[in-house]
C-alpha cells in the first residue's frame, strides 16, 4: 500500500494573465489540459494586476496559482504577486508560471517563491504530473485541506 | 543490390485503358503490394492544420471530382477570379515589397533600428507599439509598470512619433502601424507627425491595421465593447478614404488568427466575415462597394505545411473576388482584387535549436512566393521565439527574402503550381469549406455577433488544444520539440533586451510634457473627443486637434472610456 493518499477533491487552479500581456494560446492549452486531467480551472481574464490576482486566489480558495507571461514583465510582476500572497497569509499556495521566460531569470523567480517555471515547449502532461505530485505530497503530509 | 522499386518494373500498363481503370490497376498491382512490403510511415497522412486526409496520389480524376474547370476556377493572372494572382505579370516585373517587423523602446530607438533595416535593403517597415499603447494606457500608468517599450515602441504623445519618424522617406515606401483599439489616436498622431516633418503624405503608403474585431476574437488588446470598437474602426476607414485616398485604412490580420491556431478554413472564413462586418459598417456611411473594397488589405501567415499554405493563399484571392462580386455586386477589378501581405508564421519557429528556424523560414517564404506573395512579404526572425529580434537575425531575415526571390527561380513564371492535381484539389476544398463557414457565420448575424456570443473564441480555444495535442502525442513531428530533440542543449544565440532605464526615461519625458504644455487647451480638446464619441460624429478630427496640443495617448483613450465603457469578457468569451 502506498502511503500517498488519493486526492478526494479536484485540485483547484487559478490561471491568470498579468499586466498588458494578452497572449493567450499557452494559457488556453494549459487550461484545457488541466480540465481534461480533472482539475478545476478558474481563469481571471486578461490585464489583471498582481493585487487582483492575489485577491482572486484567496477568494476562490485555490491550491495553485499559475501565471502565463509572454511579454517580459515577469521580473517585476511575479515577485510582486508572491509578496502579496505571502503578506495576506496565502503563502501556502503553489505558485507556478510559464511562457517566454529566459533561463537567466529563473533564479530570481524561484527566490521570489515560484516553485516551478514551465518554459516554452513544456509538455502539458509534465505540468499535470507536477501538479498531481505536489498535491499528493501535500495530502500525504497532512497539509492539504479537503 | 536491387532497389525496392525494381520488382515492379514489369507491371506495364495495358493498351487503351481509361484513367479510372488504370488508377485501379496501378493501386492493385503496383502500389498495394509495395505498401504491403513497406508499410507507410504515417497512418493516416493528414494536412498539418486542417487534418484533412492526404491521398498517396492525385490525378485528373481528383480535379473531376471537385468539378474543376480551368476558366471558372483559375482564369488568367490579373483577371477574375484572380486565383492565379492579382498582378497581370506575376513577379516578373517587380518582386513583392520586402519588409520586416520592428519596434521597441523609445521613438529614437525605433528610428535607429528602422534606418538599419532600410540599409539592409528593406523598403517597408512595420511599427509595433508596446502593450501599454495598444491597450490604451500612458507609460506612467501604474497598471503598465515593467511593460513600457518592451514588446514594441512606447507611444505617449506626438513627441514620440516625431522622433520615430525621423527616417529617410526616399527609401521608405511603406509603413504599417499596428495599434487597433486606440486607432483614431494613433492615426491622428501619425498624421500630425508627418505634417511636422513636412513629409508628403502622397509619397508613401501608410497602412493602419485598425483590426479591432480580431483583437476581440483572439488577440485581446481591446478597450471598449465590440460594437464601439467597430464604430471607432469605421470612423478611421471613413476618414482615410475621404482624406488620404492613397493610404490603406484597414488590414485584416489573418496572421493573428493563424497563431491563435485558426486552421486555413477558419482563418479564411473568420477573416472574410470580419471584413464583411467592416464593409457593411462602411457602406452605411454612404460609400459604395467599388470605392470601399479596394481599401481592404489582408495580412496572411503561411505555416510549415507547404501545400496548405500555398492553396490557402490561392483560395483567399478567389474567395474575396467571389464575395465582392456575388454578395456585394462589386464590378470594378480594383474591388474584386484582394490586396495582401504574406509572411512565414512565427508559431512554426522553435525555441529549441533556434538556427533550425532559418530553414523553416526559407520553406515558408518559398511557399508565400509560390502562393503569389501578395504586394508585400514580411519575414519574422529566427530568434523570435526567445525575445525581441537581434541585429544578426534581422540581416539573415532580410537576406532570406532575397534568396527566395533571386536564387530559387520560383518567381520566374506566374503561379507555377497551377494545374497540379493536388494543389488544385486542395485549393478548391479550402475554398468550398470556407464559403460554407462564411454562410454559417452570416446566419449567426455576422462577425460582430459571432464575437459577442464567443463563437470565434471558443472555436479557436478548442483548436489550440487539439493542435498542441498533435505535437505532444507525436502525430506531428517537430524537429527539436518532439523529434531529434537535443537534451540539455545550450542556447547560443544573441538575445536583445530592452534597457531597464528606458521606461524611467519615457515616464520622465511624459511628465515633463504634461507640465510644459497648455493644459487648458488639452482639457478642451479632450472634451471635444468625448462629445464626438457621444454624438456619433467621426472621432479622427477631434483626436487630431487634441494630439496637436499634446494631449497624451492615455488621456485620449480615457476620454473615450468615459463614453464607451470597457470590455471585460468572461472565460466563455475568451475561449480559455
Image (cartoon, coloured by chain):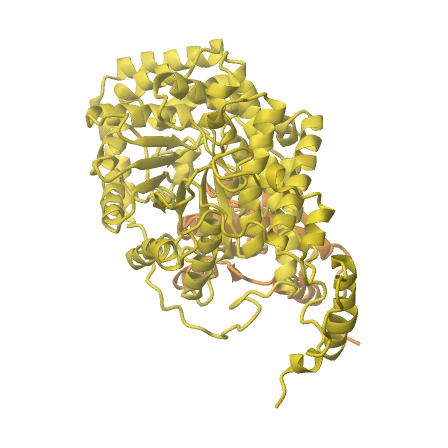
Chain colours: A orange, B yellow
**In the rendered image, the vertical position of residue B264 relative to residue B356, given as above or below:** above
| Image quadrant in which you'd find residue B267 | top right
For image coordinates 51% across by 53% down, the residue present is B347
**Side of B286 relative to B198 (left or right):** right
Q: Residue furthest front?
A: B15
Q: Can residue B401 be seen here?
A: yes
For image coordinates 77% across by 72% down, the residue present is B29
Residue B245 image offset from top left, x and y in percent: 37, 21
**In the rendered image, the vertical position of residue B484 relative to residue B433, given as above or below:** below
- Number of marks drawn: 0
Q: Quadrant of the C terminus of chain B?
A: top right
Residue B57 image offset from top left, x and y in percent: 67, 61
Residue B65 image offset from top left, x and y in percent: 73, 48
Q: Quadrant of the N terminus of chain B?
A: bottom right
**Side of B475 relative to B32 (left or right):** left
Viewer-proximal residue among B392 and B373: B373
Q: Residue furthest bottom?
A: B1
Residue A82 image offset from top left, x and y in percent: 49, 52
Amino acid at each position: 500500500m502506498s502511503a500517498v493518499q488519493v486526492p478526494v477533491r479536484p485540485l483547484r487552479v487559478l490561471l491568470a494573465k498579468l499586466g498588458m500581456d494578452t497572449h493567450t494560446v499557452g494559457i488556453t492549452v494549459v487550461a484545457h489540459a488541466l480540465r481534461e486531467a480533472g482539475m478545476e480551472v478558474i481563469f481571471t481574464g486578461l490585464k489583471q494586476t498582481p493585487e487582483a490576482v492575489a485577491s482572486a486566489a484567496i477568494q476562490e480558495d485555490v491550491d495553485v496559482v499559475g501565471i502565463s507571461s509572454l511579454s517580459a514583465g515577469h521580473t517585476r510582476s511575479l515577485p510582486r504577486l508572491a509578496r502579496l500572497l505571502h503578506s495576506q497569509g496565502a503563502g501556502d499556495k503553489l505558485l507556478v508560471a510559464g511562457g517566454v521566460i529566459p533561463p537567466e531569470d529563473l533564479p530570481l523567480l524561484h527566490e521570489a517563491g515560484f516553485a516551478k517555471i514551465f518554459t516554452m515547449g513544456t509538455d502539458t502532461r509534465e505540468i499535470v504530473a507536477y501538479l498531481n505530485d505536489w498535491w499528493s505530497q501535500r495530502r500525504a503530509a497532512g497539509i492539504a485541506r479537503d | 543490390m536491387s532497389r525496392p522499386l525494381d520488382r515492379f518494373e514489369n507491371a506495364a500498363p495495358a493498351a487503351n485503358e481509361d484513367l479510372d481503370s488504370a488508377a485501379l490497376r496501378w493501386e492493385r498491382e503496383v502500389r498495394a503490394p509495395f505498401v504491403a512490403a513497406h508499410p507507410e510511415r504515417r497512418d493516416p497522412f493528414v494536412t498539418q492544420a486542417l487534418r484533412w486526409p492526404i491521398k498517396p496520389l492525385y490525378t485528373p480524376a481528383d480535379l473531376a471530382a471537385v468539378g474543376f474547370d480551368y476558366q471558372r476556377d483559375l482564369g488568367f493572372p490579373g483577371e477574375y477570379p484572380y486565383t492565379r494572382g492579382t498582378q497581370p505579370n506575376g513577379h516578373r516585373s517587380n518582386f513583392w515589397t520586402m519588409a520586416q517587423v520592428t519596434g521597441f523602446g523609445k521613438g529614437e530607438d525605433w528610428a535607429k533600428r528602422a534606418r538599419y533595416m532600410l540599409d539592409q535593403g528593406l523598403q517597408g517597415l512595420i511599427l509595433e507599439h508596446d502593450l501599454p499603447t495598444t491597450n490604451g494606457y500612458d507609460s506612467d500608468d501604474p497598471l503598465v509598470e515593467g511593460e513600457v517599450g518592451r514588446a514594441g515602441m512606447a507611444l505617449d504623445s506626438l513627441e514620440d512619433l516625431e522622433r520615430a519618424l525621423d527616417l529617410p522617406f526616399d527609401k521608405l515606401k511603406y509603413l504599417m502601424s499596428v495599434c487597433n483599439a486606440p486607432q483614431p489616436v494613433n492615426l491622428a498622431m501619425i498624421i500630425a507627425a508627418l505634417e511636422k516633418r513636412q513629409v508628403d503624405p502622397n509619397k508613401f503608403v501608410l497602412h493602419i491595421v485598425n483590426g479591432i474585431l480580431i483583437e476581440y476574437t483572439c488577440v485581446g488588446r481591446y478597450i471598449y465593447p465590440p460594437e464601439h470598437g467597430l464604430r471607432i474602426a469605421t470612423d478611421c476607414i471613413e476618414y482615410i478614404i475621404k482624406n488620404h485616398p492613397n493610404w490603406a485604412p484597414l488590414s485584416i490580420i489573418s496572421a493573428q488568427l493563424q497563431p491563435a491556431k485558426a486552421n486555413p478554413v477558419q482563418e479564411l472564413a473568420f477573416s472574410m466575415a470580419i471584413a464583411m462586418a467592416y464593409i457593411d459598417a462602411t457602406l452605411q456611411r454612404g460609400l459604395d462597394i467599388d470605392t470601399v473594397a479596394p481599401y481592404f488589405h489582408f495580412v496572411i501567415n503561411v505555416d510549415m505545411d507547404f501545400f496548405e499554405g500555398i492553396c490557402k493563399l490561392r483560395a483567399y484571392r478567389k474567395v474575396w473576388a467571389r464575395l465582392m462580386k456575388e454578395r456585394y455586386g462589386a464590378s470594378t477589378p480594383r474591388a474584386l482584387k484582394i490586396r495582401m501581405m504574406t509572411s512565414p508564421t512565427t508559431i512554426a519557429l522553435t525555441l529549441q535549436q533556434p538556427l533550425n528556424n532559418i530553414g523553416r523560414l526559407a520553406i515558408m517564404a518559398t511557399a508565400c512566393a509560390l502562393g503569389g506573395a501578395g504586394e508585400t512579404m514580411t519575414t519574422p526572425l529566427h530568434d523570435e521565439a526567445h525575445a525581441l529580434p537581434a541585429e544578426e537575425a534581422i540581416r539573415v531575415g532580410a537576406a532570406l527574402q532575397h534568396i527566395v526571390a533571386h536564387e530559387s527561380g520560383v518567381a520566374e513564371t506566374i503561379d507555377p503550381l497551377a494545374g497540379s492535381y493536388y494543389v488544385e484539389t486542395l485549393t478548391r476544398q479550402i475554398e468550398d469549406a470556407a464559403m460554407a463557414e462564411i454562410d454559417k457565420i452570416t446566419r449567426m448575424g455576422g462577425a460582430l455577433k459571432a464575437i459577442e456570443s464567443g463563437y470565434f473564441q471558443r472555436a479557436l480555444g478548442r483548436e489550440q488544444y487539439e493542435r498542441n495535442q498533435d505535437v505532444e502525442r507525436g502525430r506531428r513531428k517537430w524537429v527539436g520539440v518532439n523529434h531529434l530533440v537535443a537534451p540539455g542543449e545550450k542556447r547560443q544565440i544573441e538575445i536583445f533586451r530592452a534597457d531597464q532605464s528606458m521606461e524611467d526615461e519615457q515616464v520622465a519625458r511624459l511628465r515633463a510634457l504634461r507640465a510644459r504644455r497648455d493644459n487648458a487647451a488639452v482639457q478642451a480638446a479632450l472634451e471635444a473627443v468625448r462629445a464626438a464619441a457621444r454624438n456619433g460624429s467621426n472621432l479622427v478630427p477631434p483626436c487630431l486637434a487634441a494630439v496637436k496640443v499634446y494631449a497624451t495617448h492615455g488621456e485620449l483613450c480615457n476620454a473615450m472610456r468615459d463614453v464607451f465603457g470597457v470590455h471585460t469578457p468572461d472565460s466563455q468569451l475568451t475561449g480559455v
